[in-house]
Image (cartoon, rainbow, N blue to C red):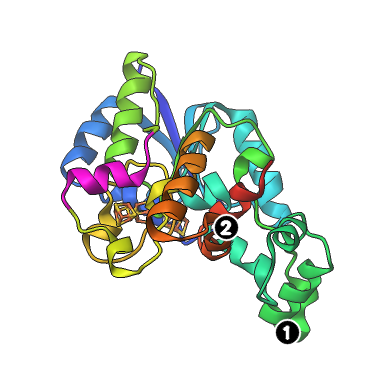
Amino acid sequence: MKPKIAIFSLTSCEGCSLAILELEDQLLDLLGAVEIVNFREGMTERAWDIDVGFVDGAVSTPQDDEEVRHFRAHCKTLVAIGSCACLGGINTLKHYQSGGATRDEGAAHAAGGNGRVAEYRRYVYGENAEWFATTPARPISAVVAVDYQLPGCPMVKEEFVELVKCLLIGKPFRLPETAVCVECKRRGSRCLYEMGIICFGPITRAGCNAICPAYGSKCEGCRGLVSPDAIAAAGINLREQYRVDLNEALADLRLYGAYQEALLP
Ligand code: SF4
Ligand code: SF4
Ligand code: SF4
């Protein structure tokens, strides 16, 4: 019997779910190997006997909180796909509505302190704010147990296919444990620090083939932070080689929620 697969979305652009539909050549092979039983973007049927559930989007409303618990209860294996589901993603930008948050303030905002929830609710919905419930944005692992994470904005399609293959044949799956810089050097891109641009490649988990620096854009950390050891080493190297203080630079690491990850002890 084919494993039953579901694809769910919480608060997000749903780009990671769409990335599955964009698998093109591989989509037919995938459909031959699994049975998709619940996928709002691709079908009308709904079934709740699920072997593997993939979830994109952050927990950013009370409804998300309820839904992700429901998904967990009906999926034998639960996979977070994309930065929103793995880190909170761009949804976490709402924690910084007043700007200029320090690391400590950022932690308080992420925890929903300082009345920030009411502030950004008013900012977005104006006089109708009370119609739209919202909460601080969190990764789904903050609410339920998650078996695998596929970070990135959007997730890396090849990594998704690799995980599905591993699950089908019972092989262990692991994310890369090196930094984006390793892939960047391998593909021969010019380092942005040589041009005076601060890039988060030294502290971000590899797996995207360093696509942003390859096109001249700094890494914004969409795949989250690599190991604490790599972060400590990067801090020393950046200070010695480029006179950049990593702790100060981290204030810019907000786009995908990795800043909040950096706040963790
Ligand atoms: S990680 Fe990016 S592409 Fe995926 S759902 Fe979130 S915003 Fe969209
Ligand atoms: S451009 Fe960024 S990812 Fe590439 S080597 Fe430099 S710091 Fe690392
Ligand atoms: S280079 Fe950085 S921001 Fe760009 S896709 Fe890779 S991890 Fe994400």
Q: Which residues are magenta?
A: 178-188
Query: Based on the displayed image, in which of its 4 quarters is residue 111 positioned?
Result: bottom right
The image's mark for residue 180 is: none
Query: Where does residue 194 sit, x and y in percent of width and height?
Result: 28, 63
Image position, residue 107 (x, y; %): 72, 55
Residue 183 drawn in magenta = yes
Examine the image and state in which quarter residue 5 appears: top left
What mark, if any, has residue 11 been given in the picture? 2
Residue annotated with mark 1: 126
- How packed mark 1 is, by other alpha carbons closer than 10 Å (few <14, some 14-19, many 20 or more), is few
Q: Is residue 118 shown left or right of residue 19?
A: right
Mark 2 C-beta closer than 8 Å to ligand 1: no
Disc 1 residue type (three-letter): Gly
Q: What's under tag 2, amino acid-wise?
A: Thr
At 80% from the left edge and 74% from the top edge, which residue is drawn? 130
For the stretch drawn in magenta, the main secondary structure is helix
Helix, strand or loop at disc 1?
A: helix
Quadrant observed for ligand 1 in the rendered image: bottom left
Residue beneath the point at 46% across and 54% down: 239
Residue that extends furthest to the front in the rendered view of this protein: 240
Tell me, yes or no, if residue 156 can be seen here.
no
Q: Quadrant of residue 66?
A: top right
Residue 149 appears in the rendering: yes
The N terminus is located in which quarter? top left
Q: CA distance from mark 2 to mark 1?
A: 20 Å
